[in-house]
Image (cartoon, rainbow, N blue to C red):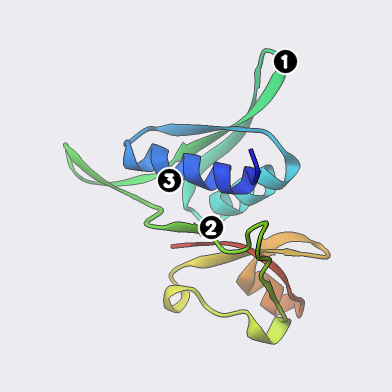
Amino acid sequence: MLDPISDMLTRIRNAQRANRRQAMVPFSKVKLAIAKILEQEKFVDGVSVEHDGTRKMLQVALKYTVLSPIEKVPAIREIRRISTQGQRMYVKKDMIRKIRSGFGISIISTSQGIMTGAEARKRGMGGEVICEVW
């Protein structure tokens, strides 16, 4: 696996398209930080660490809006990886933009940890743009 963060985002995207209740992702501290931000911003219902034999797995409980008994809409409409291994995308504090006019978030890796774009803008720091969610 070349890019574990892209794998995590793809697993979440595929699980929501298949109307699953949860997505299981191999554990890492960076993935846990990203999942905690998604939980904090109300894009997922919960995040927990499960022990699957010898490996740790990250369990992400997905969130849906129920329109009718047979139709539900996922809380995450789109989740995109911005900075890849082949092309890293860095932004300065002045260049952090709003996602979908404030309805989405960007997740940025800064020198003080992983945080949302709005929080990085408020703290006055830039960093690597990991992904965008709306």
> How crowded is the residue under tag 2: few (<14 C-alpha within 10 Å), some, or many (20+)?
few
Q: Nearer the viewer, mark 1 or mark 2?
A: 1
- Tag on residue 13? 3
- Frontmost residue, 35 versus 79: 79
Q: Earlier along the polypeptide chain: callout 2 or callout 3?
A: 3
Q: Residue furthest bottom?
A: 94
In this rendering, position of residue 11 left or right of residue 29? left
Under mark 2, the amino acid is Glu
SS class of the residue under badge 1? loop
Q: As shown in the figure, which amino acid type bears the numbered disc 1?
A: Thr
Disc 1 and disc 2 in contact, CB within 8 angstroms: no
Residue drawn at point x = 68 percent, y = 48 percent: 33
Q: Position of residue 91 (x, y in %)?
A: 69, 77
107 and 66: which one is in front? Answer: 107
Mark 1–mark 3 distance (CA, rounded to whole Å)? 26 Å
Residue under label 2, please give it. Answer: 41
- Name the residue that disc number 1 marks: 54
What residue is shown at x 68% (from left), y 87% (from top)? 94
Task: State whether residue 29 is above or below residue 115.
Answer: above
Quarter of the image where one finds residue 114? bottom right
Name the outermost residue toward the front: 86
Q: Amino acid at mark 3?
A: Arg
Image position of 81 (left or right of 85): left
Quadrant for the N terminus, please: top right
